[in-house]
Amino acid sequence: MLSLGIGGMLLGLFWDTKHTPIAILENLCVSSAPLSFLDSMVFHANLFPMMHALMVVGGISAIPTLRLLRPDCRRLCSMLTQNILCSSWMLVGMTLGSTIFVQSIRSMNGISIDKMLGGMFTGMVWGMVVSVGLYRLFYITRDRLKLA
């Protein structure tokens, strides 16, 4: 799911850079540093619409392959809601990662697109970790409440 999400993100970024030059996008990302997190999410979604859309499509496209790759997972792997939530957490992580990297790197050597992409990838991974953690916590809590 993560690799398909990253692949979708990169395809979307390629699409977005075909319509707006990457130097302009980079400058706009740098200028978004003082925004709040929610404003930054909205700004990035408007700035990179295809990157966000194709990342979610990439994450959801993992559903058919999950049953083949993990037969022990059964129907839990094919739950659309879980995959949409995971993709949403990956979006949050991607924006948070790029925002944090922009903030921390500004004080160092300057900003470059590869550092921002590194922040996005790192944020996507941690967004997925949070999603899986919350998902498992939900089922553990639900099972314990059933036993009580």
Image (cartoon, helix red, strand yellow):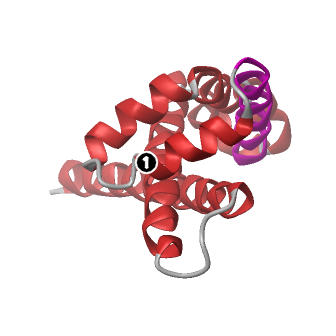
* Horizontal and vertical percent position of residue 53: 60, 21
Residue furthest out toward the top: 19
119 or 25, nearer to the observer:
25
Q: Amino acid at mark 1?
A: Ser
Circle 1: element type: helix
* Horizontal and vertical percent position of residue 42: 36, 30
- Residue 137 in magenta stretch: no
Is residue 130 toward the left or the right of residue 122 in the image?
A: left
Q: Residue at x 38, y 38 (%)?
A: 41
Classify 10 Å Cα crowding around label 1: few (below 14), some (14-19), many (20 and above).
few
Is residue 32 toward the left or the right of residue 147 in the image?
A: right
Q: Residue at x 28, y 38 (%)?
A: 39
**What's the magenta region?**
1-19
Q: Quadrant of the C terminus?
A: bottom left
Is residue 144 toward the left or the right of residue 43 in the image?
A: left
Asked if residue 27 can be seen in this view, the reply is: yes
Up-down relation of residue 135 to residue 7 (above or below): below
Residue placed under numbered mark 1 in the picture? 31
Up-down relation of residue 27 to residue 21 (above or below): below
108 or 70, nearer to the observer:
108
Which secondary structure type mostly characterizes the magenta part of the structure? helix
- Residue 2 in magenta stretch: yes
Q: Residue at x 52, y 66 (%)?
A: 101
